Image (tube, rainbow, N blue to C red):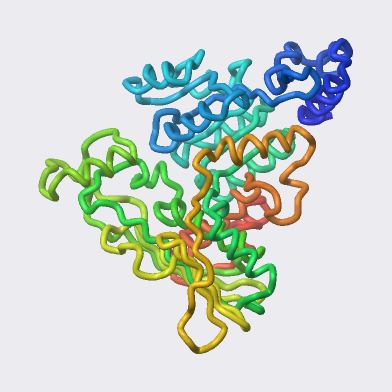
Amino acid sequence: MSLREHCKQAERIREQGYYSLFSQLPLVQTLKGADVIVESFFRRSEEGRSLQMHVGVGVLGATGYIGAPYRNEIRQSGDAARIVALCARRQDRLKEAARLDEAALVTDQWQDVVEHPEVDLVLVLTPDALHFEPVMACAARQKHVVCEKPVGIDARQAMTMWQAIREAGVFHFVPYWTRYHPLFLRARQFVDEGRLGVVQGVVYRWHNPRPRNMPYTWRDDAQLSAAGSIADVGSHAYDTIRFILREEAQSVVAHSDTVMPPKPDVGDVDLGEAIAWGEQHATDDADARRGGGTPDFCQLLLRFPSGIRGCMILSHASYYRKGFAPELELHGTDGSLSIDRFSGELRFSDSPDPARVVETITEDIPKNRFGSVVFPALSQHLAGNSSDDSDMQEGWPDMQDGWRVQVFVDAVVASARQRQWIELSGVEAASAGDAQFEQD
């Protein structure tokens, strides 16, 4: 019986008021401290009958651009969770983070967090190349995981992590937040209801312009970043497309490049600090500069098994500004739909006439993503409902989605290098160890 099943059994017993039977559970007999494991997940409510989830959280990359807002959301989630342990390289930030979170442990060693007995859920928010070891360690210790995208450095790593996590039976979540935006959920409904007819084409423009003089960060380092803008914003864009269409791409052809000039080298700064520095300094302020080793621009074509054709532009270049055209277009035999997050407008056309606004949605992704999405998903998992068991993308985004998106990223990188169409099936087979696949 998996840890999830043991926790589910414990929950049923406690709900029925037979707490004394807890000591007789196989988990208690076989695992030292098993009562701590289950107690950390469930707390009796005021009525004394129902149970509330109460999870201990450890955060790797706790003080970075992503870690800081995630921790704030967890703190605002009430009794659902408490932050137990923090890990970060920036010691100057850790002390204040520990004070805010009331964390019991602060460290610069990720192993200390994963091994902490009160940590049940680990957030892996480090650079791409540093995800693999902590995730595998979480699987070995049956710790639940939230792993930032892209989940690994390549699809082989992603597959290995997904297999380990799945076999461990633990909860796993990958923050593909764009699919939770009300505009994209509405677009998916349009497709599902057949209002576009048979979808024939898709256009996605993800322009995320950074300041012209933004300093060098780990995202520019090919040793730490999976594939620059392709992995960063491309992973969100592709997951959104596959989520709406309920279909994986079959093949891609791409061109990518590093189009921005060498960047100021101002030391170890996170993305937020780099953006702020770039906005405050002129182009000639830096004494030292470093050339980016990852692509900051990519344009690509996609083909899907159903016959859908697509094109995407992915960019962090400062001069590919946004707001000039819809972010996403879906074109079908009976109608076309565009989605614009800046105006909140959905435009529709079923004739040669210009598209008309059919809806305006001003709501955004939930402000507390952990309270609204992650913790409810974890609760479902502990109740026996696994994302792995759902139809395609009906559950929450998980490590399987992370692997499928990584397959897409690897195929795009290979296509840009080889200057030819790449079949995603070849990348899939290689990631599972069934074939050889070379990106170069």
Residue sitting farthest toward the bottom: 352
Q: Quadrant of residue 8?
A: top right
Please state if 113 lies on the left or on the right of 11 as rendered.
left
**Tag count in the figure?**
0
Identify the residue at image location x=65%, y=46%: 396
**As rendered, which of 337 and 158 lies closer to the eye?**
337
Please state if 51 lies on the left or on the right of 62 as rendered.
right
Q: Quadrant of residue 223?
A: top left
**As rendered, which of 44 and 159 lies closer to the eye?**
44
**As rendered, which of 109 and 68 lies closer to the eye?**
68
Q: Position of residue 394 (x, y in %)?
A: 70, 53
Q: Position of residue 217 (x, y in %)?
A: 31, 42
Q: Quadrant of residue 341?
A: bottom left
**As rendered, which of 319 and 434 lies closer to the eye?**
319
Q: Is residue 174 above or below residue 122?
A: below
Identify the residue at image location x=67%, y=39%: 377
Q: Quadrant of the N terminus?
A: top right
Q: Is residue 366 above or below residue 76?
A: below
Residue 320 in view here: yes
Please state if 271 lies on the left or on the right of 246 as rendered.
left
Identify the residue at image location x=65%, y=43%: 162
Q: Position of residue 323 (x, y in %)?
A: 35, 64
Residue 253 in view here: no
Q: Position of residue 204 (x, y in %)?
A: 47, 67
